[in-house]
């Protein structure tokens, strides 16, 4: 198998796995998927340099771990971002609701 | 006109919502990051164990215990914060092993680079996981 084929197949397999896992998680990673695919392509390039070296199978496993870790890391950052937006909206809503309640009940403003 | 009761109910709902925040982050950590950490830890434990060969003999017992403690800590659900403190010793063993294994021609230099990248990604992932704790 030519090096270019290995690189192409490796990147394709990894990105396909990421898509399946993201769908199973119910997370939308469309934007992030691009950055992970870019990282996968970079790692495929690095991996191609290791072809023929002793211990290549260790590098193959390590690169799959690298993609999985990077993908999960990005997924957590996205999820944290969603949480932060929800919290900000909730806190803002709480303040407004508390003020409205004070007005309705006639309590003095804080 | 919105009643007091309605506003009170609304406040309760929003308070409950705010205490549930962090849900997506927690779920992503347990469902995505933790499995990736566990998968990577298999290879890292192997690297660390092979790294023990590269250190002085009188340090072998302590190093073996350190690797076991780290791997055991990773198996807990959730991964406890003290796992971070166990990481530097494991990482150092892995690095010592990479140098040693390249010298012995057990792995090539580009293979070592892939293994080092895994250490970097693992550390960042572990830190990110702990940020949610």
Image (cartoon, grey):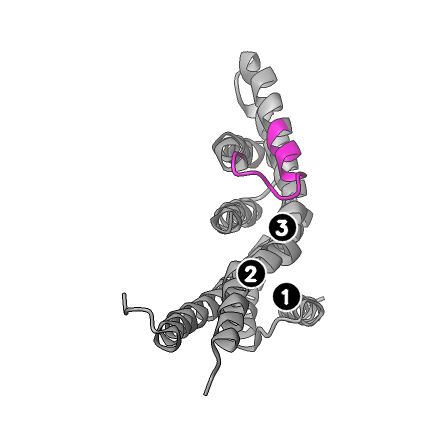
Crowd tier of the residue under label 2, counting other residues whose Cα lies within 10 Å: few below 14, some 14–19, many 20 or above: few
| Vertical arrangement, residue B88 with respect to residue B26, above or below | above
Dot 3: what SS?
Answer: helix
Residue in the image at 34% along x and 73% along y: A106
Q: Residues within 10 Å of mark 3 (few under 14, many from 20)?
A: many
Does the CB distance between marks 3 and 1 fall below 8 Å?
no
Q: Which residues are magenta?
A: B69-82
In this view of the protein, can residue B56 be seen by the observer? yes
Q: Residue furthest bottom?
A: B1
Residue placed under numbered mark 1 in the picture? A3
Tell me if mark 1 has few (under 14), some (14-19) or many (20+) residues whose alpha carbon lies within 10 angstroms of its own. Answer: some
Q: Are marks 3 and 2 on the same chain?
A: yes
Which dot, 2 or 1, sits closer to the camera? 2
Left/right placement of residue B85 relative to residue A44 reads left
Identify the element where label 2 is drawn.
Answer: loop
B62 and A94: which is toward the camera: A94
Please name which of the two marks, 3 or 1, marks the residue nearer to the observer.
3
Residue A1 drawn at (x, y percent): 72, 66
Q: Which residue was labeled with disc 3?
A: B34
**Relative depth, front residue between B99 and B40:** B40
Q: Nearer the viewer, mark 3 or mark 2?
A: 2
The answer to whether residue B70 is magenta is yes
Residue at x 53%, y 74% (from the top left corner): A34
Q: CA distance from mark 3 to mark 1?
A: 33 Å
| Measured Cα–Cα span from mark 2 to mark 1 | 49 Å
**At which x and y percent is residue B120?**
49, 47
Q: CA distance from mark 3 to mark 2?
A: 21 Å
* Residue B20 badge: 2
Q: Quadrant of the C terminus of chain A?
A: bottom left
**Tag 1's secondary structure?**
helix
């Amino acid at each position: 198998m030519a090096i270019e084929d290995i690189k192409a197949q490796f990147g394709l397999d990894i990105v396909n796995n990421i898509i399946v896992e993201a769908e199973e998680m119910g997370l939308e990673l469309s934007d992030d998927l691009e950055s992970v695919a870019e990282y996968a392509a970079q790692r495929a390039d690095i991996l191609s340099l290791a072809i023929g070296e002793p211990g290549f199978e260790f590098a193959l496993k390590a690169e799959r771990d690298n993609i999985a870790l990077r993908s999960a890391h990005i997924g957590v950052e996205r999820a944290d971002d969603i949480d932060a937006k929800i919290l900000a909206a909730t806190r803002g809503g709480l303040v407004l609701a508390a003020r409205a309640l004070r007005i309705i009940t006639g309590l003095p403003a804080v | 006109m919105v009643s007091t009761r309605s506003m009170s109910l609304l406040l309760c709902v929003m308070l409950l919502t705010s205490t549930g925040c962090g849900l997506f982050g927690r779920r992503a950590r347990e469902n995505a990051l933790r499995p990736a950490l566990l998968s990577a830890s298999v290879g890292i434990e192997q690297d660390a164990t092979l790294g023990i060969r590269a250190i002085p003999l009188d340090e072998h017992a302590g190093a073996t215990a350190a690797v076991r403690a780290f791997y055991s800590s990773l198996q807990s659900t959730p991964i406890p914060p003290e796992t971070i403190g166990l990481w530097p010793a494991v990482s150092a063993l892995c690095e010592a092993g990479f140098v040693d294994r390249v010298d012995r021609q057990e792995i090539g230099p580009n293979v070592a680079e892939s293994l080092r990248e895994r250490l970097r990604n693992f550390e960042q992932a572990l830190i990110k996981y702990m940020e949610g704790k």
